[in-house]
Image (cartoon, coloured by chain):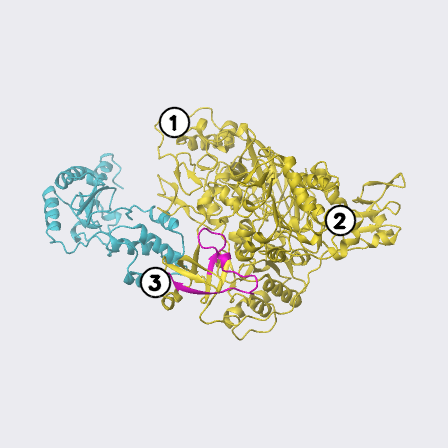
Chain colours: A yellow, B cyan
Amino acid sequence: MADSDVTPIDGVAVEINGVEVIAHKGELLIDAAERTGTYIPRFCYHERMKPVGMCRMCLVEVDTGRGPALQPSCMIECTPGMKADTESAVTKKAQDGILEFLLANHPLDCPVCDKGGECPLQDQTMAYGPGESRFVEEKRHKEKPIPISDLVLLDRERCILCDRCTRFAKDVAGDPLIHFIHRGNNTEVNTFPDEPFASYFSGNTVQICPVGALTASTYRFKARPWDLETTESTCQTCSVGCRISIDSSRDQVQRFAGVDIDPVNWGWLCDKGRFSSEVVTSDARLSVPLVRDGSGLVAAKWSDALNRFASALDNASSAQSIGVIGGSRLTNEDAYAWSKLFKGVLATDNVDAQLGDGLPAHVVLGLPSATIDEVCARGGTVLLLGPDVKEELPVLFLRLRHAVVEDGVTLVEVSPRSSGITSLAAASVHPRPGETADVVSALVGSAVIDREIAGVSAAELESARAALSAATGPITVVLGRASLAESATVTVAAASSILAARPDTTFLSALRRSNVRGALDMGLAPGLLPGRVTLEDGAEWYSEVWPAVPSATGLDTEGILRAAADGRIDVLVLLGADPLSDFPDADLAERGLTGARTVLAVDTALNSSSKRADIVLAAAGFAEKAGTTTNIEGRVSTLSQRVTPPGTSRADWMLAAEVSNRLGTDLGFENFADVLAEISAVAPAYLALDQAIAEGSPDGILLPLDVVVIIDEDDDDIVVVDETVTVSEDGAEVDVTADVVAEESDGDDPEGLIEIIADDSDVAGSMPPFVQFEPIDEIASPPVDSYGFRLVASRKLYDQGTLVQSAPSLSPLAPGSTVSLNPWEFDRLGVAAGGRAIVRTARASVNVTVQADAGVPRGVAAMIVNQADGRVSDLVSVDELVAEVRIETAP
Amino acid sequence: MARLTNDNVELAREIIGRYPRPKSALIPLLHLAQEQDGHLTDEAMAHIGELVGVSSAEVLGTASFYEMFKMETVGRYMVNICTNISCQLRGGEELLAHAEKTLGIRPGQTTSDGLFTLEDVECIAACTEAPCLQVNYRYEHRISNEGFDQLVNDLRAGRRSDIPSHGVLAEVRQHIPEDRRAGVVTPEDKAVPVWIAAAGEGDK
């Protein structure tokens, strides 16, 4: 308790229940009370939304000098000298009365209610309410749950009208599809007739509903809260890395819920992440390894499958004839183990975690990085140069939306078509696909733009340029691939011009696949080794800890598939990858898969590519193994095991170790902690990570850590210590502190964070530097074909991917293939909205439904990647910078 | 009977133009839609949402607060009979019972020919004219059972061109004859009420 004479300058001294506490300036009484240990009951107040004072449950007696009066503590800010009594007779009577009123029409069907056992109304009635009701009248009856979307059901009898779900829909998600209607005596929450609450974030309303009014179709009647076992983990549906809790009962995952951490998800989840709990228990999961015999893939013994897997690798004619695609499904430990096997034992560098739909590793790892918090910092300026974040990284969209709406962030969007965030952008320009880099280089320049570039008018460009120029500090860039029909080179060129014009710019990469960042960090990319170092720089370092190191930079996925198509790949390994569905050029993927002599797959479920493999190892999936993961920011957080993997499937690191044993090399791993220990001992950016995790960090850990590395000259052991750890040196226990060590330092210092100490400067000098971004020069714009359309191939949240299709509740939500055109094009093409059209390139054509979309610029045909009927990847060729298509009426 | 007609969209844009924020025009536009279709259709509400930039659910949320916006089909003539205190004292309930018999419907229902919807309403501010009623919010004062039947016959026969179909807006004003108005009377000019005089408090 602070002394009243020494009030901090920005603190406000208030008295809660007779005890003086210091509130922050502008802090709400309900928050100040909770922070200092006094919980005030509430229903409508939610710390991530603005208060409304609807439910009156948080009424407490407050005296601001005019005598005590009941006031809602969620609506009043602390002021100096305020006295609040949360336990007075008046307060208690108010709480009692409010609860009696709330229960007057509440059905009290708690025994059959999903919320029973974890229900704030139930809990607070127990804690603060009357024992009995005086109401004997008939309660209101309404139709029991009505579906308000495919995923959420509403029981209006149970609703206490707290406004949490409707506020979330409007203020947080920006999808005001549910609202109070028939206001007055018959107020209820509902949707507009035949317009469901089809928000990507609808599941959050179920989580924040303080009663059982909103329930999720995936969880209804599945479990009771007191039977649930809960573990915190990190969502792996996309690479934002939202913190979640996994609830299981009877060793079956029942549901996921968001956990509030400040730097990432604020408690929110997207529906794809939340309801991907169904994927864990999907029937499609592999429980045993499969090998191909005459009749197809059949179940096999693990020893047979692993032997055949290992001998296929052993029999490859050379390291260059092995290609490995995929890895973003893995934990960091899995990725490291595979990386060590393929790069450190088999010495192949033909390894790529991305499927040609991401960005080169040097861009992701080498650009100056920004965290989500830094991108969303109050008053900042953000250039969004990437995918539709609402479709690909939904919770990042929520954070950006909050930043723009509440925190005065200026957003400038450069994308080939309007997106889910366009309405929030201060300026949004849609350059012709393939010519984005020209527009970006003009936007970051200081010269006034007075001409049209890439189909965007000078006025639009100038307004976007002005918005960027008005930034008071460095800008941040959200960088990704807006269209798979446009080469990654365009994005790299754009990033190069931004960095050249504004060297203090920082970047957040908008990659989509779950742990793609971790896979890259673990070296699953050509020319890369674990810990964000290049093969060139790190070969010497790793040659001391690994049996082998690749001799030269290998191929990326495109290169591997080309080599396979040419018959130069003996063994193609798919680590959870599905190139047939996900590689932007389906023709090349098909030729590659056909051309590879042996295809090995390691996956949790079969996909269209692994169905054609010769051996499939069954891997444990999310919630079935412990480990760590790295999100788009480079933030490492933990993954926990909650349930047993199906059948005999096992974690990837175990499989890598087993295969390695059969190849005659012991990877040295007996549990996942061994792998983590090795990563944190040898991977430069990950040094000392296991120690940081052991110390616990629910918010995750941004790497590299501020640590001290001591390289012992006698046996070349690397010892990592933080500031105060005691280490053994020459057999004696010595206290080493960072300051002391720094003074004696003569080592390398890659980012000013890691100190290297060694008497033997040769060893110290071998600590490799981190990957650097390799800028490229301007690229030539392709010529404009006035009869053709430029193709934009972007993603929707729900697609035909294995994850969505393994979740029965999500799979029907995939929208299907369409081509969206600007309605102004309809007349000249002779097509109409809802009709069919043929989209044709030189190599293939698809027949799809036409959609009118004024957000698509003229001359652009926008299609959705990986949907049923009419695959976009059939049209795209990786040889082209951008895909040109013709549109014809379907006969 | 669906979205706003082209003419009405033009009118809607003009109405929206009168406000600093488009969504402020929501209620005038709801009136416009009700005038067009006699009630608010879902399509019209969705269309209004598009015009003023709010979601359909928000349009419904606002519209459903107001009793006089009808979400379902109503008769061409909405008959509101007052049964509040003054009218009740002067036969409002009897008038309502007579109306139910004449029209063959209960309050809240619509005649099968789609002409009349009957409603039982609270005070409509014509207490000096009790019992009174409104047809499409146009007043009928001091109405007797016979007068009601006459009114219904006239409406059926199309003799009341002064009462347009439900939803059509007008400046609805009461026209109470001069001699029946309370007017402005200063306290000095008023006679002492009997109950005060009886208690001997009247003489100052």
Q: Residues within 10 Å of mark 1 (few under 14, many from 20)?
A: few
| SS under mark 1 | loop
Q: Amino acid at mark 3?
A: Arg
Quarter of the image that includes the C terminus of chain A: bottom left
Give the labeled residue for mark 1: A135
Quick check: do tags 2 and 1 share a chain? Answer: yes
Does residue A564 appear in the picture of this structure?
yes
Q: Chain of mark 3?
A: B
Quarter of the image that includes the N terminus of chain A: top right
Any mark on residue A391, and which? none
Q: Amino acid at mark 2?
A: Asp
Percent x, y for residue B68?
A: 28, 48
Q: Is residue B4 above or below residue A286?
A: below
Q: Is residue A483 above or below residue A36?
A: below
Any mark on residue A706, and which? 2
Q: Residues within 10 Å of mark 3 (few under 14, many from 20)?
A: some
Q: Chain of mark 2?
A: A
Q: CA distance from mark 3 to mark 2?
A: 61 Å
Q: Nearer the viewer, residue A507 or A680?
A: A680
Q: Residue furthest top?
A: A132
Does residue A401 appear in the picture of this structure?
no
Q: Nearer the viewer, residue B34 or B65?
A: B34
Q: Is residue A108 above or below residue A853?
A: above
Number of the front mark, 3 or 2: 2
Q: Chain of mark 1?
A: A
Q: Nearer the viewer, residue A156 or A605?
A: A605
Give the labeled residue for mark 3: B13
Q: CA distance from mark 2 to mark 1?
A: 63 Å
Q: Which residues are magenta?
A: A862-891
Where residue A637 sits, quadrant-wise, is top right
